[in-house]
Image (cartoon, rainbow, N blue to C red):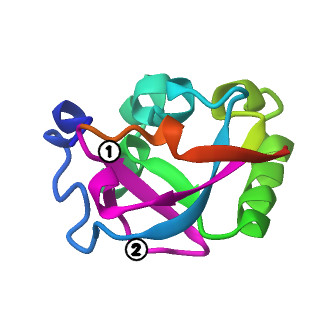
Amino acid sequence: MKYQKELDNIPQCPPKDAEAKVTDSFRFVFDPVCIKSFIPQALTQPTRMSATNDPVQKCSLTGLSFFTSDVAAVRVYNNIKMIKKHKKARIGSHLAEGTLDPKDGLQSAVKCEHFDLHPSKNSCLENKFKIVSVL
C-alpha cells in the first residue's frame, strides 16, 4: 500500500471488507489535477490523526475519500464549506470524475455514496481523473 507506514499503526486497516474493484467515482481536486489532490488527510492534517483514538476514524483519515455520484460529492462539499470556511484550500476547489480499477488499491464499503480508497503503492490517480466542475 502507498501509505503502509501509517497503516501499520492502525488495527484492521484497510478494513476487512475492503475490495479491489472497478468503480466510477468522484473526488474533490485542485486545478490542475495533480498529486496534491490525492494525499490523505492523515498526512495533510496530522493533527486530526492525533486528535482521535478511534481506529475506524484513523483508518478513514489514511484513505482517500471518493463518492459514487456527483450529487453526493457536491452535497458533502457544500456541508463542509458551511462548517469550515477555509477548508476549500485544503480539500480542493473542483470536482473530478474517473474510474478506479483493482490495481489502484482497496476500497472500503460504500456508505451514503462515500467510500475510502487505500491506494496501492504504484497507483497514479492524478492521471485517471478529469475535472467536471468548479465547486
**What's the CA distance linking mark 1 and mark 2?**
22 Å
The residue at the point 67 percent across, 45 percent down is: 130
Q: Secondary structure at mark 2?
A: loop
Quarter of the N terminus within the rendering: top left
78 w.r.t. 126: above or below: below
Q: Secondary structure at mark 1?
A: loop
Which x, y percent locates residue 126?
51, 36
* Circle 1 or circle 2, nearest the eye: 2
Q: Residues within 10 Å of mark 2 (few under 14, many from 20)?
A: some
Find disc 1 in the rendering and name its residue: 53
Where residue 97 sits in the image (x, y, percent)?
Answer: 65, 54
Q: Which residue is mark 2?
A: 109
The part of the chain drawn in magenta is 96-121
Does residue 125 sit above or below 11 in this rendering? above
Q: Amino acid at mark 1?
A: Asn
Q: Going by the picture, which residue comes out furthest to the front?
A: 127
Which residue corresponds to the image point at 60% horizontal and 73% vertical from the top-left?
Answer: 113
**34 sits to left or right of 70:** left
Is 98 on the left-hand or right-hand side of 44? right
Please check the rendered image and state whether residue 87 is part of the magenta-colored stretch, yes or no.
no
In the image, residue 15 lies at what x, y percent?
25, 64
Q: Is residue 91 above or below residue 74?
A: above
**Residue 49 on image: x %, y %:** 39, 34
Of the image marks 1 and 2, the number of the one nearer the N terminus: 1
Location of residue 72 (image quadrant):
bottom right
